[in-house]
Amino acid sequence: MSRRTRHAAVALVLVAGLAGCGGDDGGGGDGKTLDVLIGANTQYPREFKAWQQSIAAQFKAQTGASVTFEEFASANDELTKIQTSVVSGTGPDVYAVGTTLTPTAYSTGAFVKLDDETWGKVGGKDKFVPATLGISGPDEQNQVGVPFVSRPFVMVYNTELLQAAGISKPATSWDELRDHAKKLTKDGQYGLAVAYKDNYDPWKFVWGMSAQAGNPLVDGRTAKLRDPIVKQAYDTYFGWLTTDKVVDPAAIGWTNSQAIAAFAEGKTGYMALTSTTSAKALDSGATKGKWKFALLPTVPPGATARPAGGVEAASILSGDNLLVADYSDDQDLAFQFVKLVTDQPAQLDFYQAAGNLPANAAALRTLQSDPMLAPVAQAAQKSVATPFTGAWADIQLALTNVVVQSIPDLAQGGAVPVDARLADAQKAAQSALDRAK
Amino acid sequence: MTLIIIVPLLLALYLSLIDLDQYTLRRWLDAPFLGLKNFGEAFGSGLPHAIWISVSFAVLATVATVPFGIAAALATQNAYRGRGLVRAVFLVPYVLPSFVVATVWRTMLQPDGIVNTVLAKAGIDGGLWLSGPKSYWTLILVEIWAAWPFIYLMALAGLQSVDSEVYEASAIDGADWWPKLVRVVLPYLRGPVLLACLLATLNHINNFTLPYVLFGAPAPDDVTVMPMIVYVTSFQSLRFGLSAAMAIVSLLIVAVPLFVYLRALRLDVHDEGGRR
């Protein structure tokens, strides 16, 4: 079938379906409306809505244009919205896209690439925390994401339990964390809360430990999941439950929120992966006034110092970027909006409203004086971007699948045989990288 | 009909023939034409396993719900005090949204959930319900719980159509309850229950919400049913062409019982239901 025939046939089939599915293609300024797609905030919905209203009022005063916020419930909802907008060429003008989804959004080619002029419109790169720019694009010449907020991952620990165990400061290496957890495990008390059943947590441990040991899992177009470093990361992660026995056996069924809830009961020393958004839950449990955030360990398992080539990955680079759709007729207006919400006042307002850390460097500095937040702010600065490739979604899925399929072995105790599963993961990851265009 | 059925169907067929992913989505009309390669890859990957899991799960769930549905219909056929309440209670699993059913069962079947706690008191180790091989039986169990009232409803409708004269005649003939059930009542139910089985099997095969909420994605291999593999391929791997090919195969599989159903329906027009 020739391309022209194919186009004609498909266009004919589609014409009825797509007729009437128009979008808002207004210009900039007075009487215009900017459509912004942003993630819903289920923890602080009222505060989030108030922030939106405040921003809309400021934007109206500055530009004469209105802003409509459209919320999505999950990354999948957002992806669906991106897909339909990309195909139809209509939809939101600005997207708040999660950092790990940014490579996927970039690979669609549907967002404005940022040059010096566009960076200038939003206030310049210098106004952002340098680490947050790490996942704006594959390289400095091909960036699409303007950092909006940061949600770095940290540990939280029970100050009372650590003090009682004679531990003066939280662990800085994974081996030290295991040793602390062993000391803390006794009499119905566990050293560590881990969400083995979570669909997003497990790969973050594996990527972090591997990157610290010098293997970021992707080298150019080659997946490196069968590296002994990766196996050691899985062994360490599984070993907390099976051989070290420092985790509640029920953790094989826990999602992240269940692990937080278990930690909040006050009988666990550390919760290994959380963010500032858990503060509310921690303050409403038995841990009220007895918890602190700490950086995740940055020395890989089996080592007392990072080896050559290892990176100080305190967290994946986590948060949201703002992307402007290239089909938007209101791009100038969109960049004015991006500037407004990434300036210091709006960033601090958003932190107060939703608990997300600012990507604006000056705004973040003002929060570092709060001792409770200092480790989180430090984690934001030491966050490292996951490999920027359109294949990352598949790689992440493959890494998680190793844990999902290993849970029955975890429940049995003893060593978990991951070799065959890692081979499958490597195959899936390499296949995704081979398809990357 | 053209807009709702034929256009999406033709689109799905077209998508299944092209290399459509996040890289080609924007200019999808220019996406490379692959012919049947997506179908080849689908059968070379996890699709045959997913077909086996889906079909076996659907058939087992249907077979298991039939006795429950018929028994419940028989138990609520004759009038007695409180029958209305019993009938209403029987419908509860059916009217609950699938995600509510799955969420409640997911909570109960946690390793330290209420089911294992109760079993432990009886000296039984419940083990893992939501991971590993047992997850397959969990899926069937929860599906049975949620779906049996459909068979019950259809069987009850069948029972309502039995003439009272038939009961009276069998009573005059001195028939006991068992011969009356097997030789008089059940033949009347054959038509409606068979149709209910076909429709229920289709529903089980197409059920996405229940496995997705119960087990999450990626799901354990033992419960990777067809809707799950299509979902993961489409929305997590972003391979829309490949997932369209998988969806087409799913459609063909579902079309087999659908064909049987339509044929049975046509036969019923001439045979006046249970009066055969």
Image (spheres, rainbow, N blue to C red):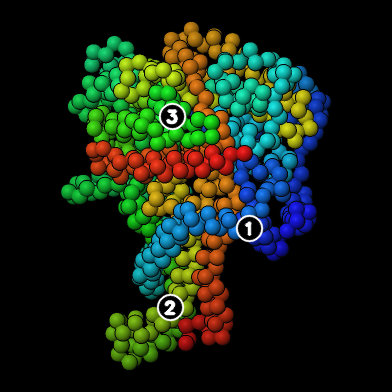
Dot 1 falls on a residue whose secondary structure is loop
Q: Name which residue lies at 57% across and 80% down.
A: B266
Chain to which mark 2 belongs? B
Res A49 visible: no
Mark 3 surroundings within 10 Å by alpha-carbon count, few (fewer than 14), some (14 through 19), many (20 or more): many
> Residue A361: where, in percent of width, then height?
58, 12
Give the amino acid at mark 3. Answer: Trp
Please name whichever residue, A167 or B143, is drawn nearer the observer in this view of the structure: A167
> Residue A91: where, in percent of width, then height?
71, 38
> How far apart are labels 2 and 1 at the CA level?
47 Å
Dot 2 falls on a residue whose secondary structure is helix
Q: Quadrant of residue A262?
A: top left
Dot 3 falls on a residue whose secondary structure is helix
Mark 1 surroundings within 10 Å by alpha-carbon count, few (fewer than 14), some (14 through 19), many (20 or more): few
- CB within 8 Å, label 1 to label 3: no
The outermost residue toward the left is: B123
Image position of A218 (left or right of A330): left
Chain to which mark 3 belongs? A
- CB within 8 Å, label 3 to label 2: no
Mark seen at residue A219: none
Give the amino acid at mark 2. Answer: Leu
- Give the vertical position of A112 relative to A62 (above or below): below
Mark seen at residue B189: 2
Image position of A141 (left or right of A433): right
The residue tagged 1 is B35
The residue tagged 3 is A207
Q: Quadrant of residue B36?
A: bottom right
> Residue B198: where, in percent of width, then height?
48, 70
Please check whether the numbered discs 2 and 1 fall on a single chain: yes
- Give the vertical position of A289 relative to B128 (above or below): above
For the N terminus of chain A, the quadrant is bottom right
Nearest to the eye among marks 1 and 3: give it: 1
